[in-house]
């Protein structure tokens, strides 16, 4: 495997190492090459920790051709959550897992039950901060809701993904969970690590595991998720006496693209010093256009991408302007892929349909609890009903279960109870009937002519039709929709992405739109100016050959100060066209 001087230094390094890998510098190549070297030259056990399943799969596929089966047995690759869950499972310290969507729904139920007075978004934010150790305790107005949430999890012997890492650390602190037996641990995208994840890593380092942290503090853009960024590198440097290896050669982009992005990011003060260099040299195309209206900006984007939309990505700070562009692209018949969109199967009421059907196939009380939040039935009654049906599949509902309900609530409970009981017997023989019955019951909660309810019914019946058309028993149909990638669009098209979702990707041509004051930097994030600057840096470095940037200068809109810092505009050059 051919390596440049800095890549070779990273691969040959021993002990604790910080690899500062700039955009397009061959980060994955270095991770693969170093793992291969250690597996071939030693008997060490190697673990590579990632933040996404996609990154983990990529590394496995890149490593397999270069390692023997015996060597691969000494290698573990996975996300933080996957590896820590396995860590807990092999020690018998974890029960049912609740995913992010179900967890948030359960938090909503607890929030409602506690009649919490602060906005739900604030409550969720406080819970996230608690789980990541950013705060040590919740504000008093959140305590009751969180207590109800934990009670519900305990009742179903479940734990949410947000608390998995905290659980592992708590056991490690008490000496009830030993670090994993690995000699070398590599962490990919190290700038995205939070305090809890870092503690898990450091506890392995204290057990004589060598740490290789690979990332770029200039691409730390997840502060809202409590990512430590620059601070994480400084902790490793200080606590583990780690050496630095800087990889600044960009193999992705031409120098025109790299130079302006470098000028921008060098305005940040809290960063690790490095020199960026484009291996391709000159030959790229960049441009900045300032328009007098959003419509004029969209016209220019459409004109540029319509000949070869598959070559382009359009990137914006927020989804709002991308949504407006989507409408124009649809009108022109230009194909597009919007990675910012939520998965169809995660929308309400589709996720409720899937949750109830999943419970029929295998017990999933959390999903049922979420779905039945549509009714006015009290949460404790729902929990009692779930417990009763887990033990008794055929008996009639006991009077004690219904005595606290009114007629409407009893009707709702009896109806769904009948559907579920019939479902237990028909999963293999008549799955279509179960699907239609559950969908019909759910549709009653979305009756009405307002746009939201009409759209919800449309999604529900689209999901029902999709499941009915699939083959196999109910379990097989549910596995099919879970495992398939619902966001793929045949034929491709222009990629529409937020700056956050563009991270880690690269495109032949990129158009950064709405690079304006009040958009980037975002007005609510004035205290995180360096984070906003890093966010634009990430967007600017996605391009390989061509990068266009646009802004609207009209009324309250004006080009972002960042365009001046990047030396792409001068003080008198922002004239609208």
Image (cartoon, rainbow, N blue to C red):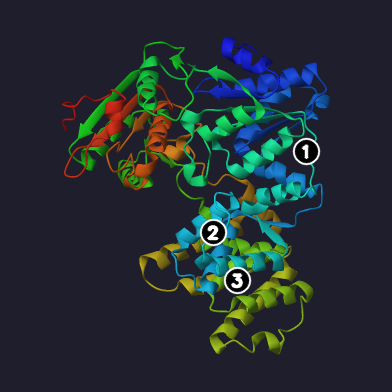
- The residue carrying mark 1 is 180
* Viewer-side label of 1, 3: 1
Who's the residue at 64% across and 79% down the image? 381
- The residue carrying mark 3 is 437
For mark 3, does the 10 Å Cα neighbourhood hold few (<14), some (14 to 19), or many (20 or more) residues? some
The answer, for residue 432, to whether it is visible in the render is: no
In the picture, which quadrant includes the N terminus?
top right
Q: Nearer the viewer, residue 105 or 110?
A: 110
Q: Position of residue 275 (x, y in %)?
A: 45, 16
Vertical comparison of 332 with 457: above or below: above
Label 3 to label 2: alpha-carbon separation = 13 Å
Mark 2 or mark 1: which comes first in sequence? 1
Label 2 to label 1: alpha-carbon separation = 42 Å
* Viewer-side label of 2, 1: 1
Q: Nearer the viewer, residue 445 or 465?
A: 445
The disc at residue 463 is: 2
Mark 1 or mark 3: which comes first in sequence? 1
SS state under label 1: loop
The disc at residue 408 is: none
Vertical comparison of 411 with 11: above or below: below
Mark 3 or mark 2: which comes first in sequence? 3
The answer, for residue 379, to whether it is visible in the render is: yes
């Amino acid at each position: 495997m051919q390596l440049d001087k800095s890549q070779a230094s990273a691969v040959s390094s021993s002990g604790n190492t910080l690899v500062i890998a700039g955009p397009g510098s061959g980060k994955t190549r270095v991770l693969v090459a170093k793992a291969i070297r250690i597996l071939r030259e030693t008997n060490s056990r190697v673990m590579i920790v990632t933040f996404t399943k996609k990154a983990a799969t990529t590394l496995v596929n890149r490593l397999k051709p270069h390692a023997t089966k015996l060597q691969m047995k000494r290698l573990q690759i996975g996300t933080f959550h996957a590896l820590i869950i396995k860590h807990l499972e092999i020690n018998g310290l974890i029960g049912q897992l609740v995913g992010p969507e179900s967890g948030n729904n359960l938090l909503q139920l607890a929030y409602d039950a506690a009649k919490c007075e602060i906005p739900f978004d604030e409550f969720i934010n406080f819970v996230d901060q608690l789980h990541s150790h950013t705060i040590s305790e919740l504000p008093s107005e959140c305590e009751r809701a969180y207590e109800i949430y934990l009670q519900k999890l305990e009742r179903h012997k479940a734990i949410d993904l947000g608390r998995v890492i905290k659980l592992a650390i708590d056991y490690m602190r008490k000496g009830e969970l030993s670090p994993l037996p690995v000699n070398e641990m590599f962490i990919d995208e190290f700038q995205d690590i939070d305090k809890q994840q870092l503690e898990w890593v450091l506890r392995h380092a204290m057990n004589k595991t060598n740490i290789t942290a690979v990332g770029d503090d200039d691409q730390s853009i997840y502060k809202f998720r409590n990512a430590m960024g620059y601070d994480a590198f400084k902790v490793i440097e200080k606590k583990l006496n780690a050496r630095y290896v800087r990889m600044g050669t960009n193999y992705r982009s031409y120098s025109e693209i790299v130079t302006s992005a470098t000028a921008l990011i060098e305005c940040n003060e809290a960063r690790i010093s490095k020199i960026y260099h484009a291996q391709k040299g000159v030959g790229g195309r960049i441009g900045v256009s300032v328009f007098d209206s959003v419509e004029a900006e969209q016209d220019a984007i459409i004109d540029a991408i319509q000949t070869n939309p598959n070559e382009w990505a359009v990137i914006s700070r927020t989804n709002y302007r991308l949504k407006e562009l989507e409408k124009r692209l649809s009108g022109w018949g230009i194909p597009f892929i919007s990675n910012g969109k939520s998965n169809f199967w995660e929308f309400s009421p589709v996720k409720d349909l899937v949750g109830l059907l999943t419970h029929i196939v295998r017990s999933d009380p959390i999903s049922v609890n979420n779905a039945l939040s549509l009714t006015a039935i009290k949460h404790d009654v729902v929990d009692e009903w779930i417990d009763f049906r887990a033990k008794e599949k055929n008996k009639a509902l006991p009077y004690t279960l219904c005595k606290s309900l009114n007629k409407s609530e009893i009707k709702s409970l009896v109806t769904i109870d009948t559907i579920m009981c019939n479902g237990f017997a028909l999963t293999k023989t008549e799955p279509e009937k179960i699907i239609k019955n559950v969908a019909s019951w759910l549709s009653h909660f979305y009756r009405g002519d307002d746009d939201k309810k009409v759209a919800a019914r449309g999604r529900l019946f689209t999901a029902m039709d999709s499941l009915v058309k699939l083959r196999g028993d109910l379990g097989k149909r549910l596995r099919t929709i879970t495992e398939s990638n619902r966001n793929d669009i045949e034929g491709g098209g222009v990629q529409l992405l937020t700056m956050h979702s563009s991270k880690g990707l690269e495109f032949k041509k990129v158009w950064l739109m709405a690079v304006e004051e009040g958009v980037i930097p975002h007005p609510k994030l004035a205290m995180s100016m360096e984070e906003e600057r890093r966010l634009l840096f990430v967007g600017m470095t996605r391009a390989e050959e061509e990068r266009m940037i646009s802004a609207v200068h009209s009324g309250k809109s004006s080009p972002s100060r960042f365009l001046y810092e990047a030396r792409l505009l001068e003080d008198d050059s922002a004239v609208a066209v």
